[in-house]
Amino acid sequence: MFKLFLFFLILILNFGNISHANFEVKAKTAIIQDYNSGEILYEKEADLSIYPASMTKIMTSIIAFDLIKSGDLSMDEKFIISEKAWRLSTSGYSSMFIMVGDQVSVENLLRGIIVASGNDACIALAEGIAGTEEEFAILMTAKAKELGMENTNFTNSSGINHPDNYSTVRDILIMSRYLIKEHPEYYKMFAEKEFTWDRTGGDPITQGNRNPLLYKNLGADGIKTGYLAVEKYSLASSINRNGRRLIAVGSGFVSKNARSRESAKMLTYGLTNFDLVKIAEANKTFDKIDVWLGKDKNVEVYTSEDVYKTIKKAKKKLLKVSVKYVGPVEAPIKKDQKIAKLRVVYDQELVGEYDLLASKEVKKVNFFSRLIKSLNYLIWGDV
């Protein structure tokens, strides 16, 4: 009897996890995130150390984009190509095919990096910005630490194999999310399917983007492939469908076909098994809060950030939202003052709590009005 009970107990427990148990990514390490909510939908050995290969070029691009945003670099600025950069414009390397002494614009170098995956373009950009690739790698690692990429170190700008150029799929996800959030106008380059380099002293060269998902009907718009013999195939990918974005990173795919198939499967899994619920929009009125002894009886409140939650399909009824405050809130109230909390509960568990701020100033009524209101409250309970 006990064995029979144990059998049914195991069956029930396994059934409860059936949707997750049936999903497996054929990669050494992988992770999926719902971009708007920031929630992780799936992970497999996500903190395992890997060689990021050409996914390193995401950070190379970020350093340039940050400088352009701050006004310290411009797209039309030109850098002179060194012999070190030119030496990677040879057969066997991903190259933009630049020549020694060429003067190439930052914009062309970035497209050479992002679309053509040119290692030569990486070195040219790194030397133009920091003087040497080694100094540029220090900037890359510092930026990684700033973003919270705790298990990442960069030693070069291209991802060419080096024992101290390492990361994790979780860290690459953090980096990819920053790229999309902070540089949406430049992120569009990652969706470009080809780049034509009108090189000096030769016919123009047109190269296609290596990201296989760009050529599928998925809504993919980035991000970056990678390959090293020791690490096999990798891909940081993202889709934007109907206003919903997912990011997936995988490494250790056994072949190009597996990289394409499994990455598409990861993104499709996130779309088909989860719903994104928008709870509050940043700086938009969410609710009204009662005010005591104020010239206004209530004040509108808002969140300073968008609030999203990702939940399993057909489970929206388990999501509950409430406003918590000790009230009515006594005037005076300052504009943007924190006066309440937005609480998000899923399946009876608190999954998020956010400050609600007053949308305007509410002044206190004069003494005579306060006296009348206090009497009304004592007699009638009217606030």
Image (cartoon, grey):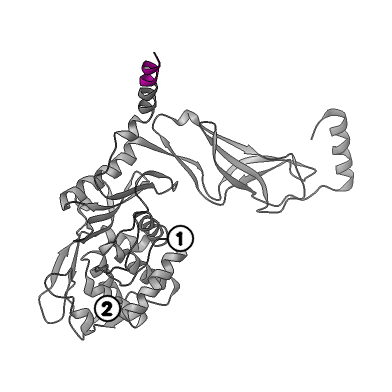
Q: Quadrant of residue 241?
A: top left
| Residue appearing at x 27%, y 73% in the figure | 122
Percent coordinates x, y for residue 220 in the rendering: 27, 50
- The amino acid pointed to by label 2 is Ala
Residue 164 seen in the current view: yes
Helix, strand or loop under label 1: loop
**Is mark 1 in CB contact (under 8 Å) with mark 2?**
no
> Which residue is tagged 1?
148
Observer-nearest residue: 14 or 145?
14
Position of 89 relative to 9 (above/below):
below
Q: CA distance from mark 1 to mark 2?
A: 27 Å
Percent coordinates x, y for residue 2 in the rendering: 40, 16
Q: Main secondary structure of the magenta part?
A: helix
- The amino acid pointed to by label 1 is Gly
| Residue appearing at x 24%, y 74% in the figure | 121
Dot 1, crowdedness within 10 Å: few (<14), some or many (≥20)? Answer: few
Q: Is 237 left, or right, of 99 in this rendering? A: right
Which mark, by number, is residue 124?
2
| Residue appearing at x 11%, y 72% in the figure | 91
Q: Residue furthest bottom?
A: 101
Residue 77 seen in the current view: no
Percent coordinates x, y for residue 259 in the rendering: 21, 50
Give the number of the mark in front: 1 or 2.
1
Position of 282 relative to 98 (above/below):
above
Which is nearer the N-term, disc 1 or disc 2?
Answer: 2
Q: So how many labels did they put on this image?
A: 2
Helix, strand or loop under label 2: helix
Position of 215 relative to 190 (above/below):
above
Observer-nearest residue: 337 or 179?
179
Per the rendered image, the range of residues in magenta is 1-8
| Residue appearing at x 88%, y 47% in the figure | 367
